[in-house]
């Protein structure tokens, strides 16, 4: 089974540093990749010493994770199962709270440097919206924070 490693700089910092803004979509709350009142980032980072947690996610994904309060949402595509999934992780522990299979479909053609889970989810704080390509059609779905479609 292939897996991707979820590794987030905000998660790797101290608990006081991860109390920043929600990150509801690609490039953050203002769409420009900035964070207001951001804590000072470390000048050096040691993956063994400074990583708070690591979590293996089945499949492959190139989308950005999103963060809302204590939840992290990430998407993945598992070609062996022919599935595209949405995962919800606990921000403090990295535990997978739930996985929902959003789409079951044969693998479509992609660029060799891409994946079938490249579209970053987005949230309004109550619902998470995801999209995947289903051969030639876009498939869009919405889930609440408990994983209910």
Image (tube, rainbow, N blue to C red):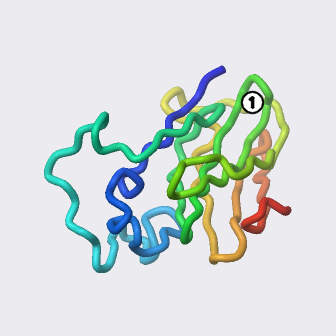
Q: Does residue 107 appear to the left or right of 15 in the view shown?
A: right
Residue ID at (40%, 47%): 52
Q: Position of residue 126 (x, y in %)?
A: 70, 76
Q: Position of residue 48 (x, y in %)?
A: 31, 34
Q: Position of residue 75 (x, y in %)?
A: 64, 47
Residue located beneath label 1 in the image: 107
Outermost residue toward the left?
A: 43
Q: Does residue 33 appear to the left or right of 92 in the view shown?
A: left
Residue ID at (61%, 36%): 57
Q: Does residue 21 appear to the left or right of 124 in the view shown?
A: left
Q: Is residue 144 above or below residue 47?
A: below
Residue ID at (84%, 62%): 148
User: Where, quadrant-wise, is the N terminus in this rendering?
Assistant: top right
Residue ID at (71%, 55%): 131
Viewer-nearest residue: 77 or 95: 95
Label 1 packing within 10 angstroms: few (<14), some (14-19), many (20+): some
Q: Position of residue 104 (x, y in %)?
A: 84, 39
């Amino acid at each position: 089974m292939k897996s991707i490693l979820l590794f987030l700089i905000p998660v790797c910092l101290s608990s006081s540093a991860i109390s920043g803004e929600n990150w509801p979509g690609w490039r953050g709350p203002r769409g420009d990749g900035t964070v207001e009142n951001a804590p000072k980032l470390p000048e050096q980072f040691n993956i063994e010493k400074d990583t708070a947690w690591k979590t293996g996610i089945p499949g492959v994904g190139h989308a950005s994770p999103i963060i809302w309060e204590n939840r992290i949402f990430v998407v993945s595509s598992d070609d062996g199962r022919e599935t595209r999934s949405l995962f919800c992780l606990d921000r403090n522990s990295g535990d997978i709270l739930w996985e929902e299979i959003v789409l079951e479909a044969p693998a479509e053609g992609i660029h060799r440097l891409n994946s079938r889970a490249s579209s970053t989810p987005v949230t309004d704080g109550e619902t998470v919206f995801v999209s995947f390509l289903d051969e030639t059609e876009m498939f869009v779905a919405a889930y609440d924070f408990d994983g209910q479609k």
